Amino acid sequence: MPSQSGSESAELMLFLMQVPDPGPRIVAAVHAAAAWFDKTAQRGFIYKFAPDGTGRALLPEPGAGPLWPRYSEIGTDRAIFGDRDKSIHDVLGEISQERRNGYQWFSDTPQRALEHYEKWAQAHPEKAKRA
């Protein structure tokens, strides 16, 4: 489904930060990715099997996170979920239990990218924005 992807984008960001002498386009892309991850981080939730037996869910947990959705709607950044019938939903509990339990809908992979970014950004500061 057309979307932005937290896990895959984090892996790409990690890859780009390994480029030995990154040009301005790579530097800008890494900074933009970090800003997007900062903006879309979901805190105060854990992703696990719900105690009521309905399957995996995003559950409130004070102090937990950050987590990012596997897929985010382009333009709104809200989490979206796809089912086997190719339908797209904005509520995890609306998709089939097989898809809800058999797919990693939330991830903390971007946190690892952001941790590497802190050191990388010192060596590759953002250029001043043009007025």
Image (spheres, grey):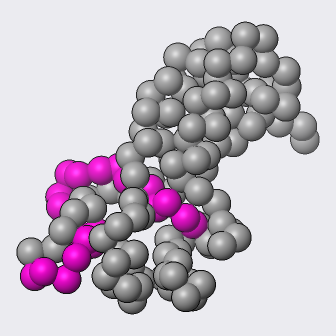
**Which residue is at the front of the view, 24 or 19?**
19
Q: Nearer the viewer, residue 32 or 59?
A: 59
- Judged left or right of residue 119, residue 100 is left
* For residue 78, above or below residue 70: below
**Image location of residue 98, percent across then percent down:** 34, 78
The extreme right residue here reads: 131
Tell which of 90 and 117 is nearer to you: 90
Please identify the quadrant where the C terminus is shown. top right
Q: Choose top left, top right, bottom left or bottom right for residue 120.
A: top right
What is the magenta range? 52-72
Give percent across and percent down for residue 77.
58, 67
Q: Which residue is drawn at 23% across and 52% down?
A: 64
Determine the residue positioned at 17% across, 58% down: 62
Q: Residue at x 50, y 24 (%)?
A: 116
Q: Say above or below: 105 vs 113.
A: below
**Relative horizontal placement of residue 112, taking residue 17 as reference (left or right):** left
Q: Is 113 drawn above or below residue 9 in the view shown?
A: above
Residue 56 belongs to magenta span? yes
In this rendering, the answer to whether 96 lies above or below 30 is below
Q: In which image quadrant can residue 48 be found? A: bottom left
| Magenta segment includes 55 | yes
Task: Please give the name of the residue rendered at 51% of the width and 82% of the height, measured from the top-left corner.
Answer: 84
Could you tell me residue 126's position as x and y percent?
Answer: 73, 27
For the N terminus, give its image quadrant: bottom right
| Residue 124 in sight from this viewpoint | yes
Between 127 and 73, the residue placed more toward the observer is 73
From this viewpoint, is residue 45 visible?
A: no
